[in-house]
């Protein structure tokens, strides 16, 4: 059975444990790269990651863009929303349906 993980600074992700998701409090980019590789090798289908952490390990994340699993989904951290997560979802939808579905932008 597939699992779901959340990675990022502790203050940004601790609430996800109450939802039954496995949390991995990580702030160090090198540790985050290693943990992402480990989770991808295990049965994690979805990995939520804070936008701030993802910005620090962008090259590592890009290695999984063409793979079906895991899906890496960016979420805002406690410091706010950079818009990167929304932009990634928008690009994925454009690829899937062939056009921009958000009108007026």
Image (cartoon, rainbow, N blue to C red):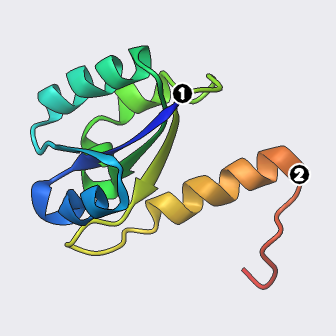
Residue at figure coordinates x 36%, y 36% from the top left: 58
Badge 1 element: loop
Q: Are marks 2 and 1 in contact (CB under 8 Å)?
A: no
Dot 1 crowding, Cα within 10 Å, few <14, some 14–19, many 20+: few
Q: Position of residue 51 (x, y in %)?
A: 34, 56
Q: Which residue is mark 2?
A: 97
Q: CA distance from mark 2 to mark 1?
A: 28 Å
Q: Position of residue 78 (x, y in %)?
A: 21, 72
Q: Left of 38 or right of it: where is 70?
A: right
Q: Quadrant of residue 50?
A: bottom left
Badge 2 element: helix
Mark 2 or mark 1, which is nearer to you?
A: 1
Residue at figure coordinates x 28%, y 63% from the top left: 18
Q: Could you say which is closer to the camera, residue 55 or residue 5? A: 5
Q: Could you say which is closer to the camera, residue 49 or residue 94? A: 49
Q: Earlier in the sequence, mark 2 or mark 1?
A: 1
Q: Position of residue 86 (x, y in %)?
A: 55, 64
Which residue, as the protein is rendered here, is positioned at the far top? 41
In which quadrant will I find the C terminus? bottom right
In which quadrant will I find the N terminus? top right
Q: Position of residue 5 (x, y in %)?
A: 36, 41
Mark carried by residue 90: none
Please say if 33 is above or below 49. Answer: above
Q: Quadrant of residue 103?
A: bottom right
Q: Left of 14 or right of it: where is 51?
A: right
Q: Could you say which is closer to the camera, residue 89 or residue 17? A: 17
Q: Which residue is mark 1?
A: 1
């Amino acid at each position: 059975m597939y699992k779901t993980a959340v990675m990022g600074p502790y203050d940004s992700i601790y609430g996800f444990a109450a939802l039954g998701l496995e949390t991995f409090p990580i702030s160090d980019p090198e540790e985050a790269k290693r943990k992402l590789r480990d989770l991808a090798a295990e049965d994690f289908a979805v990995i939520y990651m804070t936008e701030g952490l993802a910005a620090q390990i962008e090259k590592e994340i890009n290695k999984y863009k063409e793979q079906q699993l895991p899906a890496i989904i960016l979420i805002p951290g406690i410091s706010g929303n950079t818009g990167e997560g929304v932009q990634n979802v928008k690009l994925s939808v454009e690829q899937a349906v062939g056009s921009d579905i958000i009108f007026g932008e």
